[in-house]
Image (cartoon, helix red, strand yellow):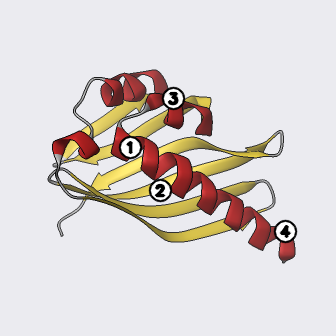
Amino acid sequence: METNQQDSSAITQVLENYYFKGIYEGNINTLKPIYHPGTLLFGDVKGQPYAKTLDEYLDGVAHRQSPKDSGKPFKGTIISINVVNSIALAMVHVKMYDFNYDEFLSFHKIDNRWLIVNKMISDVAE
């Protein structure tokens, strides 16, 4: 049980110090190290299918106005984290621009680091 608490705490740190911060600031140098290079992103945005490679996603982040610079509301919230051995699933909610995303982030512990290996998002009504 202690390992699960330590792992959940480590994932919380990744989410708060890198994931939410990187999205808010639009900083791909903060985001890139927490993703496995083969990460794929899927879901729907405003009812439209969403599918990107990690490079496509990071390019989009790099070329959009960051939530920080936009002055619009931004809030990242951790809903839950479930850890089983070297895998984990975090459910988070991200409010940014005019979007409300429910997200499922799959993590894998590789070389003692928790990395995002898959991201699924859905734009939900407030």
Mark positioned earlier in the residue sequence (1 or 4): 4
* Residue 23 tag number: 1
Marks 3/2: CA–CA distance: 22 Å
Q: Is residue 95 left or right of residue 4?
A: left
Query: Which of the 4 quarters of the picture holds residue 12?
Result: bottom right
Residue sitting at 75 percent across and 63 percent down? 7
Q: What residue would you read off at disc 2?
A: 104
Residue sitting at 41 percent across and 56 percent down? 103
Query: Which of the 4 quarters of the picture holds residue 10?
Result: bottom right
Marks 2/4: CA–CA distance: 22 Å
Secondary structure beneath disc 2?
Answer: strand
Please report contact status of discs 3 and 2: CB closer than 8 Å, yes or no. Answer: no
Q: Position of residue 75 (x, y in %)?
A: 32, 61
Residue sitting at 34 percent across and 25 percent down? 62
Q: What residue would you read off at disc 3?
A: 29
Marks 1/3: CA–CA distance: 11 Å
- The crowd level at tag 2 (other Cα within 10 Å; few <14, some 14-19, many 20+) is many
Q: Amino acid at mark 4?
A: Thr
Mark positioned earlier in the residue sequence (2 or 4): 4
Marks 1/4: CA–CA distance: 28 Å
Please report contact status of discs 2 and 4: CB closer than 8 Å, yes or no. Answer: no
- The crowd level at tag 1 (other Cα within 10 Å; few <14, some 14-19, many 20+) is many
Q: Position of residue 24 (x, y in %)?
A: 35, 46
Marks 2/1: CA–CA distance: 15 Å
Q: What residue would you read off at disc 4?
A: 3
Q: Position of residue 105 (x, y in %)?
A: 52, 52
Q: Amino acid at mark 1?
A: Ile
Residue sitting at 45 percent across and 21 percent down? 55
Secondary structure beneath disc 4?
Answer: helix
- The crowd level at tag 4 (other Cα within 10 Å; few <14, some 14-19, many 20+) is few
